[in-house]
Amino acid sequence: MTLLNDPRTRRRRLSVAAACTGLLAALLTAVPAAATPDPGDGPAAQRKVSQGARADVAAAIADGAIPGQDEIVHSANIRHLANIPKDALPGTNSDLAFQGTYAFAGNYDGFRVFDISDPKSPKTVAQVLCPGSQNDVSVSGDLLFLSTDSSRSDSSCNSTTQPVTEKSSWEGMKVFDISDKANPRYVAAVETACGSHTHTLVPERKNVYIYVSSYSPSAAYPDCQPPHDGISVIKVPRKAPEKAAVVDFPVLFPGEGPDGGGNPGGPVNPGVSKTTGCHDITVLPDKDLAAGACMGDGILFSIKDPEHPKVIDQVQDNVNFAFWHSATFNQKADKVVFTDELGGGGAATCNEATGPNRGADGIYDIVGKGDKRKLVFRGYYKIPRHQADTENCVAHNGSLIPVKGKDLMVQAWYQGGVSVWDFTDSTKPKEIAYFERGPLSTTTLQTGGAWSAYYYNGYIYSNDIAKGFDVLKLDDKRTDPAKRVRLGELNVQTQPDYFD
C-alpha cells in the first residue's frame, strides 16, 4: 500500500484536456433478472482517449504524479480496513443506507445487506436480485425502499427491460420488509411519473413519506409527460406498507409554458441542464427544512407540511454549474453544500483543463429567518489532486462528519476517490484527508470509483462502482470527536440532528 501525503505532487503532468461528454441522464442502465444483461442494458461502453492523453497518463504514473492502475493511495490519517468485492450482483454499485450493525448497499441489479458489527470484516447477510437502476436505497424501521428509474416490463423483481414509450412499462418505488435481514421480503410497489431516480424519506411515527426525484420527460413517454416540474410524494403506512400510494405531486417550479419556471438551460444558458424535475433532495426533519438539487436549479423549501412542501428560495449558477446533483446541510442548518455532476459522472473533469470551479461543490450560506431565508453563494470546493483523463471524476454523494463547532464532510468523487474536507469557513474550504485508487485503465475512459462515501458510527463506508464495498478508518484530532456520536439508523438524505 502506498501513501501519497503531498497532493501538490499530483498536479504536474495532468494538463491535457478533459474527455468531457454531454450530460448522461443515467450513469448506467439496469441489468435485468437474467444472469446476462439484455443488449443495451450493460455498463456504458469504454471510450477511447487520444494517443497524447494516453502518453500523458503513462508519464504521470511513471513520475509518481498519479497512482498506478488500481494502486491504492491515501493520506496518512486514513486507513483502509476492508474491501468486499461484488458477488452475486455484478451491476453498478450505487447508494448506501445504515441501520444498527447493518449496511444496505444498492446495486443496479438489486441490493446487498452487510453485517458491519466488525467493520474490519464485514459479512454478507443477503443479496437480493431486483434489477432497476439506480436502486437508490434507504431504510426506516422494518422497511427498505428501492428506486427504479429504468423502464421495466412490470413492477416485479423478475422484470425485464421494456421501451419507455410503451404505456405498460413500469418505473417507481419498491418497498421491502427487512424485519429479517437475511430474508428481505418484497411487499409493495408504487408507480411514479418518470420513475424514481432517487428518493428521500421524511419518516413519522405512523407513516413514512417519500419524496421521489425524477426528470427528463418527453411527449413520447406515456408515463413521463412534460412539464415535469415537481416531485411525487408517496405515503407509506408502516403497519400496512401494501397501501403505499402517491398522495401529491407538488409543483416546485411554477411558470408559464411547457417547461414550467425552472432553468431553461441551453441555448439561453449554454452548458447548463434544463430543469425538468429534481435529481436529489435532502431533508432536515428536525428543522422542517429541505434542499433540492434540481438539474439547473438549487432550491430551499419548507416541509412543515410533509405532504405539501413549499419552496422558499431558488438559485442558479449559470457560469460553473452544469447539473445540480445533490445537497448536504451543515449541522446548524445555516449552510448547504450543493454538488455539480458535470459530465453526468461519466467524464474526466478533475484535471487542469476543467479547473477548480467546474464539477465542484458550491457552498451556500442560509441567511434570514423563516420563509424569508435565502441561499447566498460563498465558495467552491474541488479535490486538489488532478486525475487522469481516463478517470471519470466529479463531485458525488457524501455526508457530514459530526463534530460540534465544525463543518466537516466526507465525499465520493468517483475515480477521484474519497475526500474528507472542512468547510467551517464557507469561503476557504480545504481537504484534510483522502483515499483513492489509481485509474481502472490507462488507455480508455472507464466508469468506476466511489459512488457514495458516508460517515457512520466511527467509520467511513464507500460503495465503489466497480471494486465493491470499502471500509475506511479516519484518525485525526479534528474528526476524532465524531467517534462518540452513535446513530441507530442513517439515510444520508434524511439528515439527523447528530447531537440531540
Image (cartoon, helix red, strand yellow):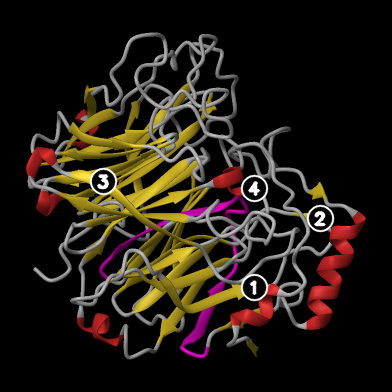
Q: Nearer the viewer, mark 1 or mark 3?
A: 3
Sequence order check, earlier mark of 1 and 4:
4
Q: Nearer the viewer, mark 2 or mark 3?
A: 3
Q: Residues within 10 Å of mark 4 (few under 14, many from 20)?
A: many
- Tell me whether the residue at label 1 lies in contact with that at label 4, contact meaning CB atoms closer than 8 angstroms: no
| Tag 4–tag 2 contact (CB < 8 Å) | no
- Are there few (<14), some (14-19), or many (20+) residues within 10 Å of tag 1? many
Question: Which residue is most to the right?
Answer: 51
Work out how far the residue at label 4 is from the one at label 3, CA to CA, in angstroms: 29 Å
- Residue type at mark 2? Thr
Residue 74: percent from the left, percent from the top? 57, 82
Vertical placement of residue 118 versus 351, above or below? below
Q: Answer whether residue 417 is magenta in the image.
A: no
- Residue 160, how many percent across, how many down? 58, 29
In 3D space, how far apart are the residues under numbered discs 1 and 2 (Cα atoms)?
A: 16 Å
| Region rendered in magenta | 76-100
Q: CA distance from mark 2 to mark 3?
A: 40 Å
Q: Nearer the viewer, residue 46 or 139?
A: 46
How far across and down, in percent of the image, does residue 244 sit? 22, 30
Crowd around label 2: few <14 · some 14–19 · many ≥20 (10 Å): some
Report the residue marked by disc 3. 375
Task: Give the quarter of the image for residue 485.
Answer: bottom left
What is the distance, in whole Å, between disc 1 and disc 3 at their CAs?
35 Å
Quickly name the residue at label 2: 444
Alpha carbon separation for disc pair 4 and 2 = 12 Å
The amino acid at mark 1 is Arg
What is the distance, in whole Å, between disc 1 and disc 4 at their CAs? 17 Å
Secondary structure at badge 1 equals: strand
Q: Which residue is mark 1?
A: 437
The residue where tag 4 is placed is: 346
Q: Earlier in the sequence, mark 2 or mark 3?
A: 3
